[in-house]
Image (cartoon, rainbow, N blue to C red):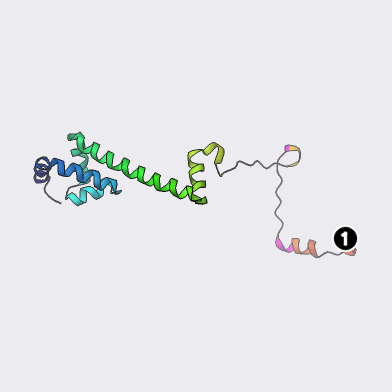
Amino acid sequence: MAQNGNFKEKFKQNMNHYLKEAQNLSKFHLTIDEIAELWGISRRTLFRYMKEFPELKKAIERGRLEAKKSVMRAMFEAMKRGNATLIIFYLINRYPEQWKDIRNIRVTGEEGGTLKVEFVPAKKQEKKEGESESDKG
């Protein structure tokens, strides 16, 4: 990692360059960690610079917004071409009340009573299935 003081001076002197670069890197889905690593500073330092230089934070946010729009445009184009999986994914996430794929099912016994579950060992079950009419007596 570069010494933070040295980078800070470079950043101030070339702010327009770094703002454009931050926006472009964000547009290509790079994370804060990845941008910091490319610049030779720590993640913590980059967050501190984002507070100190609000225009840096805005540049990263603009890049992320461009990335999001790009993904959404591609998603809608794929849905127009009939990508059923993507259509289902979109509907489930966008309209969960109407399209959720989890159903609540309640199982009860007779007349809404308690459900009786009986465990039958395999040998008893085989014998019951193998009984003939004469065995039942």
Whether residue 80 sits left or right of residue 7 in the image: it is right
Numbered label tally? 1
- Which residues are the magenta region? 112-123
Q: Is 60 above or below relative to 134?
A: above
> Whole-percent x and y of residue 31?
28, 47
Amino acid at the residue labelled 1: Lys
Residue displayed at 44% across by 48% down: 77
Residue 122 is a magenta residue: yes
Q: Quadrant of residue 98?
A: top right
**x 65%, y 41%: residue:** 106
Q: Quadrant of the C terminus?
A: bottom right
Residue 85, image x, y percentages: 51, 51
Give the residue drawn at x 17%, y 48%: 41
Which residue does the numbered mark 1 point to in the structure image?
136
Q: Position of residue 49 (x, y in %)?
A: 18, 39
- Please, what is the dominant secondary structure of the magenta stretch? loop
| SS of the residue under disc 1 | helix
Q: Residues within 10 Å of mark 1 (few under 14, many from 20)?
A: few
| Residue sitting at x 25%, y 48% | 25
Pinpoint residue 43: horizontal percent, then vertical percent. 22, 45
Q: Nearer the viewer, residue 119 or 53?
A: 53
In the depicted view, which residue is nearer to us: 118 or 88? 88
Q: Left of 122 or right of it: where is 85? A: left
Of 72 and 127, nearer the camera is 72
Front-lying residue, 95 or 46: 95
Q: Does the stretch in magenta take in 60? A: no
